[in-house]
Image (spheres, rainbow, N blue to C red):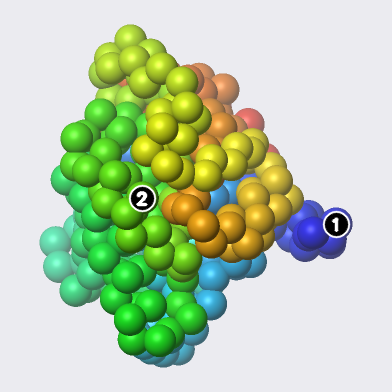
Amino acid sequence: MMNQAETDRLNHLCRQFRKDLIEVLHERQTGHPGGSLSVCEILTVLLFEEMRVDPDHPDRVDRDRLILSKGHAAPMLYRVLAERGFFPVEELHTLRKLNSRLQGHPCLLDTPGVDMTSGPLGLGLSVGLGAAIGLQKQGLSSRVYVVLGDGELNEGTVWEAVMSASKFHPENLTTIVDYNGVQLDGPTSVIMPEGDLKAKFEAFGWQVLTCDGHIVADLYDSLQKAKTITSKPVVIIAKTVKGKGVSFMEGQNAWHGKAIDDAHYEIAISELGGTD
């Protein structure tokens, strides 16, 4: 169980990450605010509390792996990785610039801390499953964490991987769904209704855990429980809010990838605590 001091520390980091994200996306006039804001606590708990990584040696073979399959949330991944020490925080201002290491979607070849290039949705779980099996065969204790978007679950390749994981069920794989209920074109319930997602994963032979994806202690407890389940693959359905923390973005598909103008920037920064 996470103690109160650590809970407070992670919540403080998440508030700062959200503010910095808005700063950079407004400055660059590009990027994906909605899905980046919803995945903030998930990435923060993984990289600061859960995963075994070494920023000074980002390629060490026994590290845990993180695959952000919903690659459009790269701006938040970069912010968390920077704070964790993989590269300077100041480098965030190069987002999407020519020759920057911080491309619009994560690139394994360019960016320290990125374990898989992602962008085309639906591929992350297949790669994560293969990585987890490979690590086990090498006798390594490393774990693999795959973060999926709920809109991404429209992709058939996800369900092929879900079916394959039920056969191979490596004990070192944890999947997390950023379940914010909104995708590019509208609510997931309208664009491609998912029905009972818990029952759907269970029908494929998975163990399903659920949590509030914005409560760091809840996320941490679910991740700890996931590691104790070895008889079947595990997915954590983390209920989140698209655009979390900025009132006019919350639950709005228009802010999936919309540039932040000056007026909206001022409102967002004010709601997130103002400039330093």
Residue 226 vertical position relative to residue 31 in the rendered view, above or below: below
Where's residue 218, x and y in %? 70, 46
Labels 1 and 2 touching (C-beta < 8 A): no
Closer to the camera: disc 1 or disc 2?
2
Compare marks 1 and 2 and give the one earlier in the sequence: 1
The residue furthest top is 190
Mark seen at residue 166: 2
The residue furthest right is 4
Residue 63 in view, yes or no: yes
Q: Is residue 191 left or right of residue 275?
A: left
To which quarter of the image does residue 137 belong? bottom left
The residue that disc 1 covers is 4
**Residue in the image at 41% along x and 17% along y:** 195
Residue 182 vertical position relative to residue 70 in the rendered view, above or below: above
Where's residue 117, x and y in %? 22, 61
- Asked which secondary structure carries label 1, the reply is helix
Q: Nearer the viewer, residue 211 or 252?
A: 211
Residue 120 vertical position relative to residue 61 in the rendered view, above or below: above
Q: Amino acid at mark 1?
A: Gln
Q: Amino acid at mark 2?
A: Ser
